[in-house]
Image (tube, helix red, strand yellow):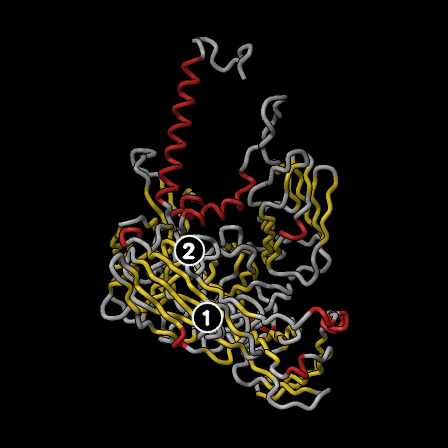
């Protein structure tokens, strides 16, 4: 009977798994017996000509392994890339001798175990650094080779991007605490495509995890490292599936081929960082005399307390916070305290102990600030006259032409506001015939403390005038605003495009997100899917967009990571398999099937780039064809004088 190894892997696993497994067969490669002289750059990787121990050797008792190649090699990255499974307590020593790579073990290997040594692409030739692809070595310290396999891919849960250099771990122990306390029984490391492979596993049932092992302790540190886990136990198995060939060997016989069926199917893991409360004061700085900044590791909400230690004071500050409540700006309202060069403060905030019990943490900080204000005051001469009255200017988002119909007018003050007379704000609609005074909504922004919104249902291609009287707004320091008079025109109606999503029904609450096409995927808009399964993103400026759906399992309006202690996987996300290019006066309806896919695909096709790439290929083929026609018959393949 004939077993076709790659054929079997191809049938059971996707193509990428077959490629990953291909490194196991490196002994079947043929050596290149000659090296070209001159000509193009050498692109041929080194060839393995001998291995000690041999591939799939049993009864190994040696202290080192030796791999000999047909040329000199460099082991620059072997120490970093080599993964030995089962894991070793001490890292092996790596050196070269002539054309051989020698890896010496600094501890005794476990008896009766099959070891896998995964070098990935870390071994390269000395001349051109051509890597040996997927170099692996398998041997056993017992009397048999364990050949069961577990393979799959690791992705980020929120973005579904492949995770490189993630440690994937198999535990024979089924206890959840094992991954935080003990070293795994088997390990693998993902490649640039997020793929991992175990090919030396004993029969049994295992827990499967993945961790971004920042401190290289081969354990999971909750809250500090990205982590993923498989919901169910992994039970690897293999069986030979016989398959008769259509080619008859003789009158009464038939050639039998087959393949090995490996299970389980490839397992896809999604990494996340658990929300683990670890509070600390990360940064404290005095930016100006009137302003201090405090940055914390976790949100402090309303639990922050400040007490001045070197001066008796009451109600001497205001607190401004960011939306997450982990960065606070303290505005000093007492001018006497603001003039002090040194502030000694007690900062009190809630902290948790090792068993997550809350207690009040008190830190003492010293904030310094010096400037030339006092020196300048001493040097000011009497005939300088009274100091000029200081005015501030609003920061705003107004564009003179093409103001976005989606946006409110946003006004921001440089300092906290003590008083703002909204009656001194006037918005007019201008036309050739008359001017109309409007009654817009004016409110303080809910996320930015010093920002105010002026909301109005803008007309397309309309002209508006914003007027704000001087001294309409006064800061907590008594500084007033300059007069504002700004005229602007809104964008044309047909400038915008529209994306419409028709989604298949689902029982989970959904949130549709519009992202920019960059790697960072900045969130541009977010819409809850309500009242049916159709979502419309309208008034979109011409640009490219990614579209993502969040499966908001708990209905809190945001994406949530997993919780390992309760075995909750991170909330699912899905990407529209196309980068959408929105044009002016354009709309498109996308039919989107949201049924769960265990592979969590993220294949974003940019049709514009694909068309450009196709045109470039066609143009290159045309040029190559013309170049061939220019060469006279009988001279193809030979250099001609003056031809490069």
Q: Residue furthest front?
A: 383
> Element under label 1?
loop
Pointer 1 local density, CA inside 10 Å: few below 14, some 14–19, many at least 20: some
Cβ–Cβ under 8 Å for marks 1 and 2: no
Nearest the viewer among 607 and 231 is 607
Query: x and y percent of residue 473 in the render?
Result: 48, 75
Q: Residue at x 37, y 35 (%)?
A: 614
Q: Residue at x 52, y 54 (%)?
A: 199
Q: Is residue 27 visible?
A: yes
Query: x and y percent of residue 588 in the render?
Result: 26, 52
Rendered image: mark on residue 539: none
Does label 1 or label 2 sit earlier along the sequence?
Answer: 2
Distance between mark 1 and mark 2 Cα atoms: 22 Å
Nearest the viewer among 475 and 358 is 475
- Judge left or right: residue 255 versus residue 431: right
- Judge left or right: residue 493 versus residue 340: left
Nearest the viewer among 446 and 382 is 382
Residue under circle 2?
516
> Element under label 2?
loop
Query: x and y percent of residue 189 in the render?
Result: 56, 56
User: Within the image, what quadrant is residue 287 found in?
Assistant: bottom right
The quadrant in which the C terminus is found is: top right
Residue under circle 1?
561
Query: x and y percent of residue 10 in the render?
Result: 40, 46
Q: Residue furthest left?
A: 532
């Amino acid at each position: 009977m004939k077993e076709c190894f790659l054929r079997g892997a191809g049938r059971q696993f996707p193509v990428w798994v077959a490629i990953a497994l291909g490194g196991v067969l490196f002994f079947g490669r043929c050596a290149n017996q000659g090296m070209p002289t001159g000509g193009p750059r050498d692109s041929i990787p080194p060839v393995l000509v001998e291995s000690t121990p041999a591939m799939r050797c049993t009864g190994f008792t040696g202290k080192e392994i030796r791999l000999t190649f047909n040329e000199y090699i460099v082991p620059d990255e072997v120490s970093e890339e080599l993964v030995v499974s089962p894991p070793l307590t001490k890292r092996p020593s790596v050196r070269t001798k002539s054309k051989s790579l020698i890896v010496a073990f600094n501890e005794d290997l476990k008896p009766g175990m099959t070891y896998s040594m995964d070098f990935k692409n870390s071994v390269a030739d000395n001349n051109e650094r051509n890597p040996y692809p997927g170099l692996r070595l398998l041997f056993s310290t017992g009397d048999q080779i364990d050949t069961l396999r577990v393979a799959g891919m690791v992705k980020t849960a929120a973005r579904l991007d492949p995770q490189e250099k993630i440690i994937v771990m198999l535990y024979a122990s089924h206890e959840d605490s094992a991954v935080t306390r003990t070293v795994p029984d088997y390990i693998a490391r993902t490649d640039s495509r997020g793929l991992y492979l175990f090919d030396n596993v004993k029969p049994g049932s295992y827990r499967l995890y993945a961790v971004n092992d920042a401190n290289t302790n081969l354990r999971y540190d909750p809250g500090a490292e990205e982590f993923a886990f498989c919901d169910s136990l992994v039970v690897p198995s293999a069986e030979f599936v016989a398959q008769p060939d259509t080619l008859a060997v003789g009158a009464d016989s038939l050639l039998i081929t087959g393949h090995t069926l490996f299970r389980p199917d490839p397992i896809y893991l999604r990494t996340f960082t658990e929300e683990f409360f670890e509070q600390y004061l990360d940064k404290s700085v005095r930016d100006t005399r009137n302003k201090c900044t405090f940055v914390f590791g976790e949100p402090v909400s309303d639990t922050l307390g400040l007490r001045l230690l070197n001066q008796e004071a009451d109600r001497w500050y205001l607190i401004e916070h960011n939306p997450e409540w982990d960065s606070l700006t303290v505005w000093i309202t007492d001018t006497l305290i603001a003039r002090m060069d040194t502030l000694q403060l007690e900062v009190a905030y809630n902290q948790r102990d090792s068993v997550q019990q809350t207690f009040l943490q008190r830190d003492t900080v010293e904030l310094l600030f010096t400037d030339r204000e006092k020196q300048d005051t001493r040097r000011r001469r009497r005939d300088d006259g009274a100091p000029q009255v200081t005015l501030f200017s609003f920061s705003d988002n107004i564009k003179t032409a093409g103001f976005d119909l989606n946006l409110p007018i946003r006004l921001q003050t440089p300092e906290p506001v003590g008083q703002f007379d909204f009656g001194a704000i006037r918005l007019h609609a201008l036309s050739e015939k008359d001017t109309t005074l409007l009654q817009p909504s004016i409110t303080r922004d809910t996320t930015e403390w010093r920002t105010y919104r002026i909301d109005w249902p803008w007309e397309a291609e309309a002209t508006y005038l914003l007027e704000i009287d001087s001294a309409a707004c006064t800061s907590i320091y008594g500084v007033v605003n300059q007069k504002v008079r700004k005229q602007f025109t809104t964008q044309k109606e047909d400038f915008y495009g529209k994306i419409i999503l028709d989604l298949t029904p689902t029982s989970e609450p959904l949130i549709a997100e519009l992202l920019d096409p960059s790697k960072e995927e900045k969130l541009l808009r977010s819409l809850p899917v309500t009242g049916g399964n159709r979502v419309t993103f309208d008034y979109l400026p011409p640009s490219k967009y990614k579209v993502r759906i969040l499966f908001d399992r708990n209905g809190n309006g945001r994406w949530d990571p997993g919780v390992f202690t309760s075995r909750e996987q991170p909330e699912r996300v899905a990407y529209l398999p196309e980068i959408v290019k929105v044009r002016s006066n354009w709309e498109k309806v996308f039919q989107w099937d949201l049924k769960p896919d265990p592979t969590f695909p993220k294949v974003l096709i940019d049709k514009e780039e694909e068309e450009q790439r196709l045109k470039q290929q066609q143009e290159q083929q045309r040029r190559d064809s013309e170049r061939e026609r220019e060469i006279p018959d009988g001279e193809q393949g030979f250099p001609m004088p003056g031809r490069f």
